Image (tube, grey):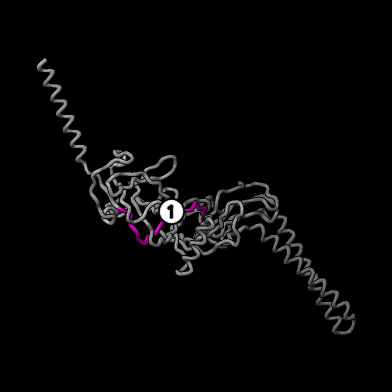
Amino acid sequence: MALAMCALLFNTNCGSEKHEAEADTKLLVTTPLKKDTLSVKEYVSQIRSISHIELRTLEKGYLQKIFVDEGQFVRKGQLMFQIMPLILEAEQQKAKAEANFAEIEYRNTKSLADSNVVSRNELALAKAKLDKANAELALANVHLGFTEIRAPFDGIMDQLQVRLGSLLDEGDLLTTLSDNRKMWVYFNVPEAEYLDYKSHQAKNRPGEVKLRMANNQLFNHPGIVETIEADFNNETGNIAFRATFPNPEGLLRHGQTGNILIDAPLVNALIIPQKATFEVLEKKFVFVVDKDSKVHTREIVIGAEIPDLYVITEGLSENDKILLEGIRKVKENEKIQFNFEKPEAVISHLKVYSE
């Protein structure tokens, strides 16, 4: 019994000391910070080559030669495909012979006309036959030229759609070709953010944007917004932007995706650390400390999100004291002991500002 009493007294003393230690714990409190800052707007984007075309046949025939391979970089004018030209070569020879015959006939007729043996009308008719023969020869040369498919610009070719020996019809797809020296990146902007962008652009030069690639890394070169479409999409309320990015290393390819990042200036923004907030039913709240050191929950409205920070549009003023640490340890209307730290010092210790 004596041992039991000693144990009971020991547990009672320990519990009392623990309660006193908890009562003596001071929580950290700060206030919102009002300052000019930048928020980053992010938009899903589609990456396109400035020139992306399909190479198709203009003549029927068998594919006789392929001079390139998939993924190869080709130069402007480089021969890529050869269609068997036998028939067209024969037609060219025929047209050339007819043109030579017409020229001889014209010279003879002109000689006779100069001697007044034949009329001027017969000379004009011979000249017309010569012009027709020359035109048919030129047409035959053009058709024969269509049997050689050459690169229209420097670029990277895509997958081959045909194989050697294939019988091709007019208009059949051979491959696609992309000029990736510069890339066009398309993204959609809501109406309100479009108006903010234009008002900011009026005071500064056209906006510089960044591209976050699919691997979550930033592309090495910034882009410039060069084009905005004329009309809003009535179904989505968005308008399409196009930014141009240099691509000297050829890292970007046609068809990639990414996210466009645009810096948006915020004047006299009210900023609090994200860790001072908690969420209930998809709404954001903070604990506000009143003049009696009691905490009360208050709903806030977030206008923008910055790494580790929120920009508050409703619910707080810059003089409100908010609980920064120990959010899970307090209850509504509970009186607390706290230490106050200036918001500038609090923000300087956050991850985004300490890097």
Q: Is residue 136 above or below residue 292?
A: below
Q: Residues within 10 Å of mark 1 (few under 14, many from 20)?
A: few
Residue in view at x 52 percent, y 56 percent? 189
Tell which residue pokes out farthest to the top in this image. Answer: 1
Residue in view at x 11 percent, y 15 percent? 1
Camera-side residue of 327 and 128: 327
Residue in view at x 43 percent, y 50 percent? 301
Which residues fall within the magenta stretch? Answer: 31-47
Amino acid marked by disc 1 = Gly
Q: Position of residue 147 (x, y in %)?
A: 66, 57
Q: Is residue 73 above or below residue 6?
A: below
Label 1: state its secondary structure: strand
Camera-side residue of 343 and 66: 343
Q: Tell me, yes or no, if residue 74 can be seen here.
A: no
Q: Which residue is mark 1?
A: 303
Camera-side residue of 179 and 125: 179
Q: Position of residue 316 (x, y in %)?
A: 37, 52
Q: Is residue 198 above or below residue 294?
A: below
Q: Position of residue 337 (x, y in %)?
A: 23, 44
| Quadrant location of the C terminus in the rendered image | bottom left
Please tell me whether residue 340 belongs to the stretch shown in magenta: no
Q: Position of residue 19 (x, y in %)?
A: 20, 34
Question: Relative to residue 61, is residue 132 drawn left or right?
Answer: right
- How many numbered circles are shown? 1
**Majority secondary structure in the magenta region:** strand
Question: Relative to residue 184, is residue 216 drawn left or right?
Answer: left
Question: Relative to residue 109, is residue 254 drawn left or right?
Answer: left
Tell which residue pokes out farthest to the front in this image. Answer: 292
